[in-house]
Image (tube, rainbow, N blue to C red):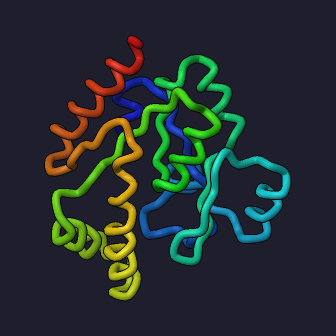
Amino acid sequence: MIADRLGFFYSVSHTTRPKRPGEKDGHDYHFVNRAQFDKMIEKGDFLEWSEVYGNLYGTLREPVLAHAGKGMAGVILDVDPQGALKIRKELPRTVLIFVLVPSLSDLETRLAKRGSESPEIRKKRLEESKKEEAYKKYYNHVVINQDIEQAFGEIKKIIECSHRK
């Protein structure tokens, strides 16, 4: 994971979606039910949250702000574009990096290999991916994830340059 390799804090999101095979609670996501998530929304626990494919996803406010106080370069989040823009609104110094697959056919292949979603959900994800790409203009940087090590190198350079500023 990129956060581990850089020594940064990675914020594990909360979700109401079912756990996929091999996923670990607290590592991949914090898996909660809808009632728990709704209570967290009411209490204002989330820095950002949204509904995606019928499931809720959210980033806890407290750990992100605690680590952001040490400098936002020390926090890595994996959020959708709407979440990223919400976070930037609350934390204006946020550096947004849009990680893009080389093509929709590559994304389709990756999703099929993962084998965790039905063909209908994969189709929705591909359609949503097209919509999300329109948000890249709001990001500071765009990295194409053709090769994981090359993409990591680019992201590392961006973070190091941002951290120095």
Query: Left or right: where does residue 67 sit relative to residue 80?
Result: right
Front one among 9 and 99: 99
Residue drawn where x is 60% and y is 68% of the image: 51
- Residue 100: percent from left, percent from top: 27, 53
Front one among 137 and 9: 137
Front one among 36 and 163: 163
Front one among 54 and 27: 54
Residue sitting at the far top: 164
Find residue 155 and report its image quarter: top left
Residue drawn where x is 49% and y is 24% of the image: 74
Residue 9 lies, with reference to residue 35, above or below; the image says above
- Residue 67: percent from left, percent from top: 61, 25
Residue drawn where x is 24% and y is 67% of the image: 107
Query: Left or right: where does residue 152 sit relative to residue 127?
Result: left
Query: Left or right: where does residue 67 sit relative to residue 141?
Result: right
- Residue 126: percent from left, percent from top: 32, 74
Residue drawn where x is 77% and y is 57% of the image: 41
